[in-house]
Image (spheres, coloured by chain):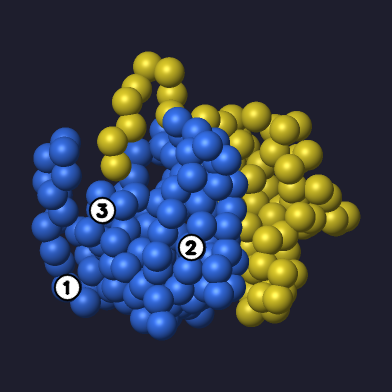
Chain colours: A blue, B yellow
Amino acid sequence: MKISFPFQRGRLILPPVTIEHQYETQPAMALDTGARMTIITPQLAEEIGIEVDLPEREVQLIGVAGSAWAIATVVNRISILGLTVDRVPVICHPLSPRLGLDGILGLNFLQHFNLSIHHDTETVSLEKIC
Amino acid sequence: MDENLNIAEVMQEHPDEWLLFEVLKDHQSPLPVEGRLLFHGKSREELHKVLMKVRNHEHSFLIRYSGDPCPPDAVVVL
């Protein structure tokens, strides 16, 4: 199954994401092929029913602007237009409010798909790897 | 805020705001066009408070920011 969705050239790519845990939301998340892990904010984690006060383990986040400690946990399901990945490990860490994002979809989610970014037509296509 | 509204139109009417919509769980056509507007405002924290009160297992909750996530005076490197 192959799906596609639009984006605006030169801006962050915001796919139509659904996250299911105890509760289901469709948050504002950016696609990031340079991030090894998927990140969700502590607010989003709480909204979908993850108990952020009971961290399974701490991990160190390392980025271009420095490093920080964050909480690693697992989300039951993340999907884009019906293409689903179950039991996705995520890092729970705040993002700058100026970004207008609830999370970042990283390679540990994207590795389940063949991903094409078409700048000429301003579309992204995803095909699930069997 | 009881009626279903067009999500794209509401986002245009409320620029640079966080918006929360209640939408039907419909995994056959998972891109919602309409939803019930539950919150709009500048604060993600206020949206969080509303969502924690209204969340339920029958609906999905669409969260959107209607502004530009790349402010003109900033460079975004994720």
User: Which label sits in the foreground, 1 or 3?
Assistant: 3
For the residue marked with disc 2, what is the amino acid? Leu
Classed neighbour count for the residue bearing mark 1: other residues with Cα under 10 Å, few (<14), some (14–19), many (≥20): few
Q: How far across and how far down the image is residue A49, in percent?
A: 46, 74
Q: Which residue is mark 3?
A: A35
Q: How far across and how far down the image is residue A99, in percent?
A: 42, 37
The Cα atoms of the two marked residues, 2 and 1, are separated by 31 Å
Chain letter for mark 2, please: A
Q: Quadrant of the N terminus of chain A?
A: bottom right
Give the quarter of the image for residue B36. Answer: bottom right
Classed neighbour count for the residue bearing mark 3: other residues with Cα under 10 Å, few (<14), some (14–19), many (≥20): some
Give the quarter of the image for residue A82. Answer: bottom right
The Cα atoms of the two marked residues, 2 and 3, are separated by 17 Å
Residue at the spot 81% in from the left edge and 48% down from the top edge: B6
User: Which label sits in the foreground, 2 or 3?
Assistant: 2
Residue at the spot 65% in from the left edge and 29% down from the top edge: B15
Q: Secondary structure at mark 1?
A: strand
Give whichever of A49, B76 is nearer the camera: B76
Q: Which residue is mark 1?
A: A57
The Cα atoms of the two marked residues, 1 and 3, are separated by 19 Å
Residue B62 vs B57, above or below: the answer is above
Q: Which residue is mark 2?
A: A126
